[in-house]
Image: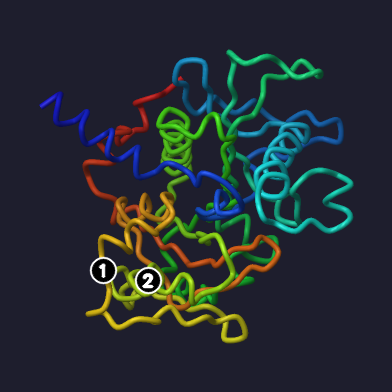
Amino acid sequence: MHTDHLARSKKFIKLLRPETAGAAAQTAITWFKPALKLAETGKPIGPSPATLGRLGPLEVRLAQTKQDVKRAQKLRYRVFYKDGTAIADAPTMLARRDKDAFDPICDHLLVVDHAAKPSLSGKQPVVGTYRLLRQDVANRNGGFYTESEFDIGGLITRHPELRFLELGRSCVLPPYRNKRTVELLWHGIWTYVRQHGVDVMLGCASFDGTDPDRLALPLSFLHHHAPAPEAWRARAHPSRYVEMNRLPKEAIDQKAALRELPPLIKGYLRLGATIGEGAVIDYQFGTTDVLIILPVSAISARYIEHFGADASRHAA
């Protein structure tokens, strides 16, 4: 039993490894406002949020100050712009931070390495990050980031009793793209989901590249083999809609298609996610995006067992 559990765990972590380079490392899914507001001094108002988990020297936690958020933005800039294919405008290049209007209303998940050499400021380095946006926060601040690409309004309206969470801006430094870091990031997300009573996760997941014809095989595979059921369906906005059905179902080599899927998308599918209708090209980041929909009720029991139904596996 123990050996079987380890085997499943290793397979699970392998499938959830982030992209090896470039803007596709951001794929995952984006959303909400911090649980704590930040004072002008950069200090949190209210009690300090608890660490979400630890694994050896690595800690996963929420950003608590404006400086914490800036550290996440600097990491995103390095992965998406400096090392990746995203195109920086003048303010982004000057700031050397990936930032947008959603950052102030989102929670930012950080993985910190306590064994690494501190920065000049004395802080331990942030080696991984995810951006989280809860539905209640999005509703008070103009909606989700994902709504710029996909029409998710109908999907949310059909499930008024459920709480949605957007995931996005995911990235990990190259030396940390291993099972330990990824497992800790997902443990942090699962802990956050349990703490806030989240029912559905969603967001944009990305392929490297902006030529859908070169992505015909994996896009067609997702269209034919992983479409969201009617109750969970949402489409790309008509003005940005890119057809995913580029090959007939019988022409798809499933093993070859799986090899071309980004590891993060494969990880979401393993968990139980399905895909919205149509893709969207993001020229700024040099990616082709698809919509991920992952109801908590659809997550396989064996993966919940891996982290613990109460998110206890790597609890601090």
**Location of residue 51 in the rendering, given as x and y in whole percent from the top left corner:** 54, 25
Kind of residue at badge 1: Asp
Q: Which one is nearer the viewer's eye here, 88 or 316?
A: 88
Q: Earlier in the sequence, mark 1 or mark 2?
A: 2
**Location of residue 89 in the rendering, given as x and y in whole percent from the top left corner:** 83, 58
Q: Quadrant of the N terminus?
A: top left
Q: Which residue is mark 2?
A: 217
123 relative to 288, above or below: above
Q: Are marks 1 and 2 in contact (CB under 8 Å)?
A: yes
Apparent side of residue 91 relative to residue 194 in the rendered image (left or right): right
Apparent side of residue 180 relative to residue 126 in the rendered image (left or right): left
Apparent side of residue 280 relative to residue 7 in the rendered image (left or right): right
Kind of residue at badge 2: Leu
**Location of residue 52 in the rendering, given as x and y in whole percent from the top left corner:** 50, 28
Q: Quadrant of residue 117?
A: top right
Q: Which one is nearer the viewer's eye here, 47 or 164?
A: 164
Q: Which residue is mark 1?
A: 253
Outermost residue toward the left? Answer: 1
